[in-house]
Amino acid sequence: MQQFSQNSMALFNDRDDKTVVSWCKSYYPIIEEKVNSITGGSPDDPDLVGEIIFRFLNRQVSFETIKSLNKYLDDVITGVCADEKRRKKTRRSNESRLEEHILTQHEKNIENQKKRLICEYLIRVAVEMLPAKIRQVFLLSHVYEMSNREIAAKLNLSIRTVEYHRSEAYKRLRLEIDLRQIDPREMLLPVILLPLLIAYLFIEKLLS
């Protein structure tokens, strides 16, 4: 490492401005080369050099000889570079965990979407399996969001009969869904079934 004039040590220890500037000019390329040899060359090297100089000067350590100054500077360089290596390792670890988390969430979203499609398919198929009057009550309740009283008036039924049809719809739907087995290929069926269900509801509405 390049020698800094022994005659300047006293002024440097007192942090004389001109002497410190002279030291920085003398040692900056040396510190830069040392950092580069440790990091292998990195875009962050200039920042590391600046941090090393700041730490070195900020600690207000006094030196009796150039040798002790150089040794202490080497320790600061090694420490700053080691800190940066740990920070990078932590950042890579955090980025890896974040990527893993995002991938996991993406896979969960896909799985949830598959389950939702299967569930929609099961419900639509099960609704089609209901007897006409029970299906009509169920659709009026859950598609058109009509109350029992409104359904009773529309279909000329008693409220108790409407309640019975709704209860029966729930029982049959649960049974139908529990009994059905789904092949993964049938996940495409909602795409086919949805237009049919919409058409069915439209026709029911026209006829009511």
Image (spheres, rainbow, N blue to C red):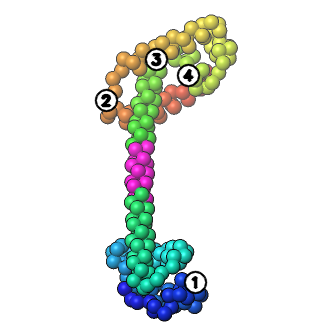
Region of the chain picked out in magenta, as a range:
91-105
What label does residue 183 carry, if any?
2
Amino acid residing under circle 3: Leu
Front position among marks 2 and 4: 2
Amino acid residing under circle 4: Leu
Amino acid residing under circle 1: Asp
What label does residue 14 carry, if any?
1
Q: Earlier in the sequence, mark 1 or mark 3?
A: 1
| 4 and 3 marks in contact (CB < 8 Å) | no
What label does residue 173 carry, if any?
3
Where residue 80 sits: x, y (%)? 44, 70
Where residue 44 sits: x, y (%)? 44, 73
- Residue at 42%, 47% (x, y): give it: 101
**Foreground pick, 49 / 18:** 18
Q: Which residue is mark 4?
A: 139
Task: Please tell me whether mark 1 sits on a helix, a strand or a loop.
Answer: loop
Occupied quadrant, residue 67: bottom left
On whether residue 101 falls in the magenta region, the answer is: yes
- Residue at 55%, 76% (x, y): give it: 60
Characterize the magenta stretch by its predominant secondary structure.
Answer: helix
Distance from disc 3 to disc 2, alpha carbons, whole Å, reads 19 Å
Occupied quadrant, residue 43: bottom left
Q: Earlier in the sequence, mark 4 or mark 3?
A: 4
User: Quadrant of the image for the N terminus?
Assistant: bottom left
Q: Earlier in the sequence, mark 3 or mark 2?
A: 3
Front position among marks 4 and 3: 3
